Amino acid sequence: MADTSTTAAAAKPVDPRLAVLREFWFYFSENRGAVIGLWVFLFVVAIAVFADLIAPYGAIDQYRDALLKPPFWQEGADPRFLLGTDAVGRDMLSRLIYGSRFSLFVGCIVVSGALVVGVVVGLIAGYAGGRIDTLIMRLMDIILAFPSLLLALALVAVLGPSLVNAMIAIAIVQQPHYVRLTRAAVLSEKTKDYVVAARVAGARPLRLMFVTILPNCLSPLIVQAALSFSTAILDAAALGFLGMGAQPPTPEWGTMLAEAREFILRAWWVVTFPGLAILITVLAINLMGDGLRDALDPKLKRS
Amino acid sequence: MKRYSFAAALLAATMFGGVANAKTLVYCSEGSPEGFDPAPYTAGTTFDASAKPIYSQLVEFDRGTTKVIPGLAESWDVSDDGLEYTFKLRPGVKFHTTDFFTPTRDFNADDVLFTFERQLKKDHPWNEYTAGISWEYFNAMSMPDLIKEMVKVDDMTVKFVLTRPEAPMVANLAMDFASIMSKEYADKLEADGKKDMLNQQPVGTGPFQFVAYQKDAVIRYKAHPDYWDGKQAIDDLVFAITTDASVRQQKLMAGECHVAAYPNPADLDALKAAPGLEVMEQEGLNVGYLAYNTQMAPFDNPKVRKALNMAINKQAILDAVFQGAGQAAKNPIPPTMWSYNDAVEDDPYDPEAAKKMLEEAGVADLSMKVWAMPVQRPYNPNARRMAELIQEDFSKVGVTVEIVSYEWGEYLERSKATDRDGAVLLGWTGDNGDPDNFLAVLLGCDGVGGANRAQWCHKPFDDMIQKAKIVSDQAERTKLYEDAQMVFKEQAPWATIAHSVVFMPMSTKVTGYKMDPLGSHRFDGVDLAE
Amino acid sequence: MQSLREMLRFLLYRIGLLVPTFIGVTIAAFGFIRILPGDPVLLMAGERGVSPERYEQLMHQFGYDRPLWEQYFDFLGGIASGDLGNSLVTKKPIFDEFFTLFPATLELSICAIIFATLLGIPAGVLAATRRGSWLDQTVMGTALVGYSMPIFWWGLLLIILFSGILQWTPVSGRISLLYFFPPVTGFMLIDSLLSGQKGAFTSALSHLILPTIVLGTIPLAVIARQTRSAMLDVLGEDYVRTAHAKGLAPARVIGLHALRNALIPVITTIGLQVGVLLGGAILTETIFSWPGIGKWMLDSIFRRDYPAVQGGLLMIAVVVMIVNLVVDLLYGLINPKIRH
């Protein structure tokens, strides 16, 4: 990344940042899947933002006269409810629409939390070295010694089942990946000329860490962030499914699945739609993540 | 596909007669037993796998009723002061002969004494035969306070001496913790230094004997050839442990089991319509309720409680929470229990009237908490959903509800506090079919700060149930309990919500199965048609 | 000789690294359960409740009224002597509980990994050699769908379709109840063969199909993607180009030269899936009533079975640590550069 941008800047008299961005978009848009993913993702975001305007009903409004109505194309459907209703007569479509908010919210919060803390801790470990480094890395080893879902489950059991606690647990579980990535990048950058030069010039450690080194380790972190965005959504849904995530009546997709499990034989729609919503959202993000990786990873660009 | 169909065909051939002539009944149970000695446990799942098939009790519940009939005791006498119970034991009862134990003698008074003394006496060598074992049911039924002593009159006679008269005593002895163990087997295990095995390789006098248990997967039994009430019609009994309700239903429909426990109410229509299956049903011996804190204003005013009760749309709850697998409750005891007072009239669902009553009581802008249990129980399959419905109902009469919940253990503990804020959703499943087990435990003055979650101590009511505890005349007891239910309804410490209805889907080949009002699953007396 | 000693040193160094991690894991496993809200005694008592005196008695009996550090050192001492305590629910030793259930999880995990590897590597190779073709796009598209799959939902769908509607596979469990034989290895496939009972093996196999697919889906996707990108890397290397130039048949190039080198990162990937598998086992076992440790852990957490949760967490962490160590060593063995 570092040298591409410098050469680009040297070659043309345009704003180097713009050039980087343009180059990025060039490679990103080459990947058709990534572009589709981006559009789907933007669509989901739009749904989440305008949920109040789009959703025909409230997420927890109960229509007692329409329990477990099938979607519109099936016999016995209630035309008021396009995708049918659940066991207490709530509109599936509205719940799915509002549910998008929770999934995106989980993704954003978890990623930003894990990213910020992970980067800071990783920078410290990489820059400070010595005992602090060892201590931090052993701590990360301990977290990594447990399967992430199991650890998240145990953490939520401690904190009490709720969406916020599920997010905290997932963020903690994802922590080590950011720490390791940042630390590795810092270690490789630390000895490079530009850092040494900055240090000789008298830059303070904090400035060195955040202003000099960090921007040059960004691309693996961005790729990791995209990855963990989708993992966070999946894990939150899994926790919800096991009854340890968002609590009913929150229209979180995983929680909706858990509630719907008893209707698996009788009302396929209450089981199928929330899962499909999770799959589509996660798939879109992963498609984007692939595009990001291809666009940012100079190694793959070459071939 | 072909291969599996072949396996299925083979399975069908063997299970439903033909290839092998052993009759095997497969029951899809809902969970793993905690152990095979019933006395240390309190879970119905454990009793279904231990007390019911493997053991007998001195007295037993007649199948399909809560009537107490002779079991290992042929007859019994109660002294006039109600303090001495003398049991005449049944002669010639054989214990199971298994791979791991061959009995040399028949059942006698030593076995009875062993069974109860290990639970009663702290210094008994079997009081803590495995680390961490304790006798919860025995304690919960206050047996340690109640039993003064147990006397072996002769080899075939045992006498229980009580510290106070207790009308439900005989019914208590029919309960699962009173399952009779073999002292000879215990002695052998002690001599071998393998006491733990009592809880893993059980020996009893019951209709089926233990063969093998594969953790979390399968329990196998075979018919006890010398069962004192005659050998069972089926030869082998298999419990296929299947924790997921939908999966149990799938297995039943696929012919992988003959009987399945606890169907999803949502699946009932499909099960009823399925060829070769039938669904039995019975009201459960339980009640689900909403207990107000009657020591806290404004809920100390019966009129307020009554008004709130009238605001609850029970029918909506039955539809949405029980999916029809429940009936509205008007009394604190279920209709299958003797002394149920059908003359009591339920509070009508009338939000308008309720609103007016609240105004009359001077209550405006009331906001309250409703506690919702975090777990599924027989009397309340989805407390959260129930709380949401109540929340909506109450909002129509101008009462704002906040729903709170805690981890189950904490929920039970916190809800006991007399200064608890809010009304709590809870329920009770009967132990022995005696109304005392509901009315005294849940609503008596002694229970305040404990199992009496309404914190309700009402002198006239308490007098009636205390009296009913000591009189032994059934008619008099019935009258007292019926009157007590009237008082309860007037005072309305609870909103009685529902009694669940228990369903048992099974293959039409199964004959003679009777549903147990106490909620257990018994396979004695059951047969499979060819 | 030299390299052997070096390897030994590397091994010791890696094991040395594990010691502080292991101690940390014991503290984590022990600490977790202590800070859980609620406690086992209250849960055991249920609606019936327990008197305050009885509560004290029971807490004392379980040893939970003693200072935390004392309990912790007991726990450590127990680990040293191979005793993780008894489950509060079944009263059986945790070690016994763990090892009766572990083979079920292991069998399922191994099947899932085999399934994922056998399908994933060829799919990845195929995609790499036909880079950019519709085949590549289909394979990679499918892999990405698999990678994005909420497996708990996937399992439910498969049950509805294959067990419910089509009735091709049994619904749950490890083997048909018709077959009954004592466990020898704990692996149902092996035990069913050893039993000599006709049809037992087929039955065990048919019970494994759906859980294997569900648990293997994500590893399959990861392996396919990893294989493809590793192959692309290798195919771009000089020696492969040289081999091509020398006129070696393409199949030979791919098979002998490229694949062998591409497999190094793939093996690491497979090893790293162990944590994913054990996490996925919780979901898969819950859905299929599979009597393994995933479900056992979940139940134990819900039941506040302190010894079971702390013992289970510890054992699982040890399994993960050992597998990671083996993968590392293997990687070091194949690729000596890493040692320095």
Image: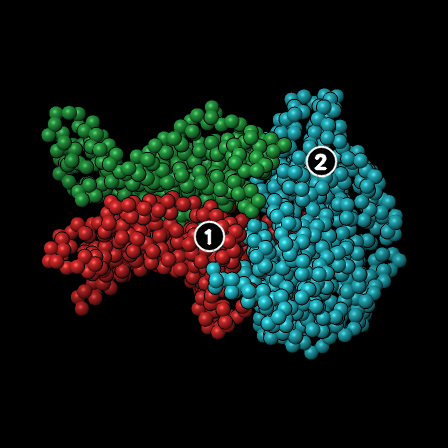
Chain colours: A green, B cyan, C red
Q: Nearer the viewer, residue B366 or C9?
A: B366
Tag 2 and tag 1 share a subunit:
no
Residue C286 shows in this picture: no
Residue B375 shows in this picture: yes
A165 left or right, relative to C8 = right
**Marked residue chain, label 1:** C
Q: Measured along the vertical axis of the image, is residue C291 above or below residue A278? A: below
Residue A252: give x, y in percent of width and height. 48, 36
Label 2, label 1: how far apart the Cα atoms are: 41 Å
Residue C121: give x, y in percent of width and height. 30, 55
Give the number of the disc on residue A10. none
| Residue depth check, mark 2 versus mark 1: number of the one nearer the observer | 1
Q: Nearer the viewer, residue A69 or C211?
A: A69
* Quarter of the figure with residue B60: bottom right
Q: Amino acid at mark 2?
A: Ala
Identify residue for label 2: B495
Q: Measured along the vertical axis of the image, is residue B433 above or below residue A17? A: below
Identify residue for label 1: C284
Q: Dividing the image into 4 quarters, which one contains the N terminus of chain A?
A: top left
Callout 2 secondary element: strand
Residue at 64% over, 35% down: B420
Residue B405: give x, y in percent of width and height. 58, 38
Residue at 62% over, 70% down: B18
**Marked residue chain, label 2:** B
Q: Amino acid at mark 1?
A: Thr
B39 left or right, relative to C1 = right
Residue at 56% over, 50% down: B246
A220 left or right, relative to B128 = left
Q: Nearer the viewer, residue B312 or B423?
A: B312
